Amino acid sequence: MEEKLLVVDNLTTSFHLQNGWFSAIEDLSLTLNSNETLALVGESGCGKSVTAYSIMNLLPKPGSRIDRGHVWFHGRDLVGLPEAEMRSLRGRKLAMIFQEPMTSLNPALTIGQQIAEVLYYHNGTSRKKALKGALELLDQVKIPAAAARLNDYPHHLSGGMRQRVMIAMALAGRPEIMLADEPTTALDVTIQAQVLALLDDLKRELKMSMIFITHDMGVVARVADRVAVMYGGYLAEVAPVEDLFASPVHPYTEALLKSVPRLDRDINELNPIPGMVPSIDCMPKGCRFAERCAHKVAICEQQMPELTAINTVGNHSVRCWVRGGQTTSSGEPQA
Amino acid sequence: MSEELLKIDGLQTFFTIKKGFPNPVTHTVRAVDEVSFYVNRGESFGLVGESGCGKSTIGRSILRLVEPYGGKVFLSGQNILEMDKQQLLKMRRKMQIIFQDPYSALNPRQTIGKILAEPLYVHHLGTKEQIRERVFALLEEVGLHSDAANKYPHEFSGGQKQRIGIARALLFEPELIVADEPVSALDVSIQSQVLALMQGLQKTHNLSFLFISHDLAVVRYFCTRVAVMYLGKIVEQGPVQQVFDDPLHPYSKVLRGASPIPDPTLSRKMLRMEGEVPSPLDPPTGCHFHPRCPQVMDICKKQYPSSISIGTERTVACHLYTPEQISKGRTS
């Protein structure tokens, strides 16, 4: 049943800073199966958004580049695909929604026009039909009194409604994959719950797969089938959501789960992770979490461990010298 | 043992806005309406609610950063709202505020040392040398190196900037700190560092916090008691465990149910509620929550429920609960 829809293979993306090129994600390998939601989790600067932008080929240019790696989608490598071909995929096969809907919507056009435009350009429908299509889409994302809303401008709408409009635009091309970059972070909790439920319903109805980027472990637990935890541009751990929360293996995942306050129970003392995320222009040698890690050994600060499977099924992988079950078995010489 | 430090009684803060063209009409927004609660010395009291519910306005009203319309605010028994400018200036030393966005709260053109020293100069507290010592001591207390004094705000990360914000709040050895979403802008791992710092400082300085947040989990961890707000009014208050584990008001239940919990076995059955918070410009008649309430009754549409006490520490403002019902033992 599980079909690999999107395969990210050893992707490395760099950004140009004042003193050279620095990688924001490095050797990132991921698969997205059909009909699943993969959550990308991590703190600011861990590379989760860069991953999505790399897949969509939306990196700001100049100033960034994909150094190596592939993104396989239906037998095609999206890396290095001509812009014209990428454009035909964007919206129709791959769609993206962003954190702040107000900055992604055109303030000078009505929402009806903006949604209709997607249909007009991607599906070649007539303008009249496109407007009708826009109405259907607004209904689909459960905007009340959709017909009246068509002529509203973005500033007429609340944050939650704007995000629904963004979702409607993303759905217009009936994409196979939806990339959602912190879509609910700017919303109030009750509205967040509504939008998450909507995304869940749509995903099931339209048989979409989703890459969901967030920093909120609570949201991850709510939406994800599988979770990829990122730290300092690398994948630290990939696991099915139940496994990750029940038995986190990577010290970073474990520490992260222990450091968040819980609504459903009393915690006497939080266990904050000491230190800070290293910035991309001064990444430490070896494992990037090493300096904050409570379990580090000598090799951690020398060499980056490989991402290795730790269970027999092979769906739970960890990049760690201590807990990854890879005591230099890769045959690499120890420094 | 518990001594009341801050007492707020029937606080009202209204804003007026003009809307319309060419003949603007003045509307009154009841941002905070008849709010009462107290904070004990050494305690953290939480205010939770969604955007626009008035929780930040309460914090600002207490410090008189916005002028309240009515009600009373007592700090150590003195009514702040009746003070003249001179008295207020003195009183402000006892109450400080920490803001959500530490970047916009710090002057980008001043060094940290200057930012921290200036208020001490303004209040004539010590010689140049003493002030320098105090600034260094404070920086160390909030976990920063003392050479931070020579740096500018942009040289610090968000977490460090918030530490500076906390250091500034501590300058006058205040009794009360209003913390307005102090960790909301921070990354998860930094959030817990700052929370741990604030908790440590609370113990060493016997501080009281009015902790304003939209994050229920953070409030549960940091506070002992909490008030849930909706459109300018407190709908329920009580000890955090009771309010979050067994919420009484339908809105508290919704808020609790909508908050994601980092546990995939629990959070799949997250509560859904349709509708959005109505505009505070034109709140619904009767109970403000009635258009979204799953247990709405006829009376809710006509009359705002009065707040009733449950036990010694809890209050709820909802027509579902009557004093008799409570004494019999509640049924949900």
Image (tube, rainbow, N blue to C red):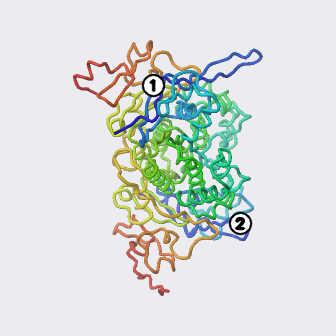
The residue sitting at 56% across, 59% down in the picture is B137
Q: Residue B124's spot in the image, x, y percent? A: 66, 46
Query: Given the current orientation, which residue lies at the most extreme right position?
Result: B22
SS at badge 1: helix
Q: Chain of mark 1?
A: B
The residue sitting at 46% across, 61% down in the picture is A273
Q: Type of residue at label 1?
A: Arg
Relative vertical location of residue B100 with respect to residue B150 in this rendering, above or below? above
Quadrant the N terminus of chain B occupies: top left
The one nearer the camera, A116 or A101, is A101
The one nearer the camera, B140 or B90, is B90
Q: Residue B97: which quarter of the image?
A: top right
Q: Residue A36's spot in the image, x, y percent? A: 45, 52
Q: Type of residue at label 2?
A: His
- The residues bearing labels 1 and 2 have C-alpha atoms spaced at a distance of 50 Å
Q: Chain of mark 2?
A: A
Q: Is residue B81 left or right of residue B227?
A: right
Circle 2 residue: A16
Relative vertical location of residue B45 with respect to residue A89 in this rendering, above or below? above
Circle 1 residue: B292
Query: Given the current orientation, which residue lies at the most extreme front position?
Result: B127
SS at badge 2: strand
The one nearer the camera, A331 or A268, is A268
Q: Give yes or no for contact between labels 1 and 2 (Cβ–Cβ under 8 Å).
A: no
Q: Residue A84's spot in the image, x, y percent? A: 71, 55
Q: Residue A284's spot in the image, x, y percent? A: 57, 73
Residue A42 makes an appearance in the image = yes
Assess disc 2: are there few (<14), some (14-19) or many (≥20) residues with their C-alpha within 10 Å of its C-alpha: some
